[in-house]
Image: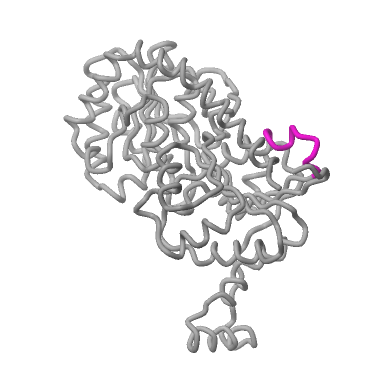
Amino acid sequence: MKSKNLKILLFFHGGSRNRGCEAIVRTAAQLLKSDERIQELALSSSDLNSDRIIPHIDVIHLDQPATLKKFSVQGLLSAVKVKLFKDESLAYRKIHESIIKLIPQYDIFLSIGGDNYCYGEQPGIYEIDRQIKKAGKKLVLWGASIGEEDLSEAKLKDLKSFDLLLVRESITERTLKKAGIRNVKLVADGAFLMEKTELPLPPGWQEGKTVGFNFSPLVIKKNPESKNAAIALVQHILDTTDFTVCFVPHVIISGNDDYEILQEFEAHFKDSRRTLLLPNDLNATEYKGYIGRMKFFIGARTHATIAAYSCLVPTMVLGYSVKSKGIAKDIFSTERLVLDLSEISDPVKLIARFEEMKAEEKELREILSAKVPELKRRAMKAKEFLLELK
């Protein structure tokens, strides 16, 4: 876009207690505010306090769902529209009014929830997008992953309304292009660009001999047996190597808190005196600072694994999604060391993959050294594609 004084709103951000979401916003903000054409960069967030740590954001707006009162004029009108026309748009406009009311203030709207389109129908999102386009504003999907199984008629209609879709791996690129969606550009997850902050190493850390381990309640919920298999893997590492295992939380949200699960792991292995647990109050750059000094990394959270990849640390991914499959494929040309949800309840497979990672450490580091700079260049192209919009 040739005009100066552009105002951009990042929206659909759930807050930085998910350090992956923080990494996306941090890198988007740093990238975009480096261009003089962008006058204001704002963030719509459902957790304001967690986002005040992020530099380069000029304004933070609270994204808080509103309630449509049943017997209000709007509520009654909505009920009639639903009953007669099966039209829920009025209800969704009310629920998401905290974002919709911002539409007149901004020129470009970046939908930054990279996973939002992986979780079934999103009629509320579709309605916000309709309102943005109705107002004649630019609408961009920023760093998304979408699987073929996620697509529906309603979702395709919404995606086709975007001015630009920036996708973070090649599987999503192929999926969308195959579905007939234009304006798709392949970039890479902005988190590959995130800086790291190196804090002092904690007691028990062995330099060059510490393995990072991240696990999530989300994985356990989807595959309950995965927890015992993960414990067996950690036990194997302790029994067969002289490594220290460092437990790394990356999402610290009530009801979806890595730290709570990892506290159980730490308690289980306490007598070994070769495990440690990082605190739950570090920011994304600080976690990356520790991950970057590890020998190997094993992780369930995608952005914890991106932190490892981007620091050239050989990495094993637990419980893949389209994003983790696509990212691994873009690095290694195959879905290397990425286990699907069914495999991670099998301790034999987990241990075999760990041994494979150990045996191929040198080759993995060489591939990462060659490919990560390319991914960083691709991530930086996102700004260029955005500002080329007409």
Residue 191's quadrant in the figure?
A: top right
Q: Nearer the viewer, residue 3 or 203?
A: 3
- Does 149 appear above or below 378? below
> Which quadrant: the N terminus?
top right
Q: Give the image location of residue 141, x and y in percent.
A: 57, 49
Residue at image point 43% right, 43% down? 172
- What kind of colouring is applied to the model shown? one colour
Residue 221: x and y in percent read: 31, 50
Residue 97, position as x, y percentages in the image? 65, 68
> Is residue 387 toward the left or the right of residue 123 in the image?
right
User: As drawn, which residue projects farthest toward the left?
Assistant: 348
Magenta stretch: includes residue 262: no
Q: Position of residue 323 (x, y in %)?
A: 42, 40
> Magenta residues?
30-39
Decide if residue 224 is on the left or right side of residue 77.
Answer: left
The residue at 49%/89% (across/down) is 84
